[in-house]
Image: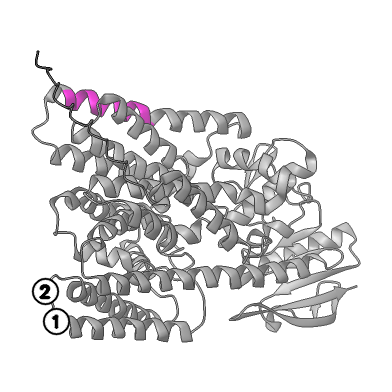
């Protein structure tokens, strides 16, 4: 009998091991690392001062709330009985609302910061803008992936080589507003590409509404984004278009109504809506001023007279554009021209740095990645929608932004959303270009951002040291106009609401302040002025006794003069 041998069984196919994801491509780990980097960078700044006066007003309010142990955003006024209109109020731009003196731009952020302030003071409240910066970088990653990129480069470039990092180190609402806006754009793209439905449209509208409670220009970007995405998404079933549009519009109103309700509870009337209507009412006024500020916040350097300032800014931007055009092209010809153009841009930056560290209001000079985004805008069809949103919104933003403050800002703070969208486009394009050109453009962007970080450190230490020294002066203190208009608003961490301090914006106000102190029977006071001419030998019944000069910042010296009867 012949034995039958069974054929051997085929070996089981072994599953391929999963591809290992490098740690910097894991969103949570990358986010944690970026947050830690922000924390380390913040240690270089003085917590007693800030990038801008809006922040000082909020910090002064937190100090007042902490001193009283309540949640009323009221700064109070020690001289209310003698100056009921607040003409001499120490912190300028403080509104008198009922019985409260209010200097707050966004109420929810103040309440979110209060427990952090209780735990760790001014440094602890920086967790909020830092989280906003991280969420913005994650939104940039998500948007980059929808544009055909990997997303990792967009995350790190937006997080560390754009104005986002500068605003992440200051107690302002910009990064939180940017985070809400970019995630809203991501959701709208998902709806347009049929990856999501009306719920995503509603979420996008709600995020735009959240952003608008902090940054008014978010309403402009919301309207433009809906129009661009809806137009680019044709053919779109009419029923779906109406449904998704209604969901987005309805959801956008909810955060705005909730914020208004919170303001009514806190102040007795809406607060931010009045600021928005003030900006909107001035949109058609002084078109020459609007055009001037549009140029300043796009290419302005804030270091020379207007003509030279714009000429040097245009030279830098043109050099960056030619360099990006030549160095990022697949063909090798023209590289020499690209390197020479990059040298011209570097020369322009060098000339500006020789004038000293200060505000750089021009978005294109502060964030070279935005210039790269403009140069590569036509390289992929997926770039069209974010580029269209970024560019079409700009004229409306220029018309609606608050006038008169183009110089003292970093990188065109009203235009940050446009810069963010173009920076993401640039990051996606840089993934597939000659590496030398990509490294060069990234290095320039990182260097420009590094200048912003250095400036913020110098500025905060200068203002923190000076405001603390002035606050140590005994008795009443009167500050005058000029560069000291925002003195106590800049140094909100040193402001004490119960101290007898006054601010005199005009010369007539200075005389009124002296009369007020005389009525109180003050035997002496300290005058803080920008120059000696503003400190005459006598003011009413008071005579000058001592005086000394202090440096507020590199380009501004102040006079601290003691007067006595």
Foreground: 331 or 29?
29
Identify whether 304 is placed above or below 2: below
Identify whether 454 is placed above or below 281: below
Foreground: 59 or 474?
59
Q: Is residue 327 something one can see in this rendering?
A: yes
Q: Is residue 514 something one can see in this rendering?
A: no
Q: Secondary structure at mark 2?
A: loop
- Whole-percent x and y of residue 260? 50, 32
- Give the distance between the C-alpha atoms of the residues marked 2 and 1, in whole angstroms: 8 Å
Assess whether residue 499 is covered by the magenta stretch. Answer: no
Query: Of helix, strand and loop, which mostly describes the magenta segment?
Result: helix
Identify whether 259 is placed above or below 139: above
Residue annotated with mark 2: 331
Foreground: 109 or 286?
109
Q: Is 557 displayed left or right of 139 in the figure?
A: right
Q: Is 499 displayed left or right of 366 in the figure?
A: right
Q: Name which residue lies at 51% across and 47% down.
A: 131
- Whole-percent x and y of residue 185? 30, 42
Q: Which residues are magenta?
A: 240-252
The answer to which image quadrant residue 68 occupies is: top right
Assess whether residue 251 is covered by the magenta stretch. Answer: yes
Q: Secondary structure at mark 1?
A: loop
Identify whether 446 is placed above or below 262: below
Q: Is 100 displayed left or right of 67 in the figure?
A: left
Image quarter (top left, top right, bottom left or bottom right) of the N terminus: top left
In contact (CB < 8 Å): disc 2 and disc 1: yes
Residue annotated with mark 1: 334
């Amino acid at each position: 009998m012949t034995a039958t041998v069974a054929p051997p069984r085929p070996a089981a196919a072994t599953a391929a091991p999963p591809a290992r994801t490098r740690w910097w491509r894991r969103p949570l780990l990358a986010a944690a690392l970026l947050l830690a980097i922000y924390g380390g960078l913040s240690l270089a700044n003085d917590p007693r001062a800030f990038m801008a006066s809006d922040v000082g007003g909020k910090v002064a309010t937190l100090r007042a709330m902490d001193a009283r142990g309540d949640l009323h955003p009221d700064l109070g006024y020690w001289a209310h009985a003698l100056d009921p209109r607040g003409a001499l109020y120490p912190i300028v731009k403080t509104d008198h609302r009922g019985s409260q003196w209010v200097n707050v731009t966004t109420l929810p952020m103040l309440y979110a910061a209060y427990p952090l302030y209780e735990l760790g003071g001014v440094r602890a409240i920086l967790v909020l803008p830092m989280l906003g910066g991280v969420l913005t970088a994650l939104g940039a990653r998500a948007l980059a992936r929808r544009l055909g990129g990997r997303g990792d480069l967009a995350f790190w470039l937006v997080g560390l080589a754009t104005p986002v990092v500068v605003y992440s180190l200051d107690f302002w609402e910009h990064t939180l507003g940017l985070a809400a806006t970019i995630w809203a754009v991501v959701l709208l793209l998902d709806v347009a590409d049929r990856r999501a439905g009306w719920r995503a449209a509603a979420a996008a509208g709600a995020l735009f509404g959240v952003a608008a409670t902090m940054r008014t220009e978010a309403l402009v970007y919301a309207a433009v984004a809906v129009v661009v995405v809806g137009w680019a998404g044709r053919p779109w079933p009419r029923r779906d278009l109406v449904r998704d549009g209604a969901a987005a519009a309805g959801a956008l109103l909810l955060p705005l109504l909730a914020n208004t309700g919170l303001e009514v509870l806190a102040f007795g009337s809406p607060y931010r809506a009045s600021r928005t209507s003030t900006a909107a009412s001035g949109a058609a006024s002084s078109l020459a001023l609007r055009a001037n500020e549009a140029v300043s916040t796009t290419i302005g350097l804030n270091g020379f007279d207007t003509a030279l300032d714009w000429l040097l800014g245009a030279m830098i931007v043109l050099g960056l554009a030619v360099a990006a055009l030549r160095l990022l092209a697949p063909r090798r010809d023209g590289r020499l021209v690209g390197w020479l153009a990059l040298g011209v841009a570097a020369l322009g930056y060098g000339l500006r740095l020789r004038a000293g560290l200060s505000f750089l209001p021009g978005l294109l000079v502060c964030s070279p990645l935005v210039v790269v985004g403009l140069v590569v805008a036509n390289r992929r069809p997926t770039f069209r929608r974010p580029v269209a949103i970024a560019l079409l919104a700009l004229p409306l933003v220029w018309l609606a932004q608050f006038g008169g403050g183009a110089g003292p800002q970093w990188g065109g703070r009203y235009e940050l959303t446009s810069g963010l969208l173009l920076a993401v486009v640039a990051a996606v394009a840089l993934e597939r270009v000659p590496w030398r050109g990509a490294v060069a453009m990234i290095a320039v962007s990182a260097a420009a951002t590094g200048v912003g970080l250095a400036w913020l450190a110098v500025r905060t230490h200068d203002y923190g040291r000076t405001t603390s020294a002035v606050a140590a002066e005994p008795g009443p203190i009167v500050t005058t106009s000029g560069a000291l208009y925002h003195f106590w608003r800049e140094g909100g961490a040193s402001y004490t609401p119960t101290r007898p301090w006054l601010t005199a914006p005009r010369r007539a106000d200075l005389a009124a302040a002296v009369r007020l102190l005389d009525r109180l029977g003050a035997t002496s006071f300290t005058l803080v002025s920008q120059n000696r001419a503003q400190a005459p030998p006598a003011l009413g019944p008071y005579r000058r006794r001592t005086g000394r000069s202090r440096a507020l910042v590199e380009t501004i010296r102040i006079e601290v003069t003691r007067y006595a009867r």
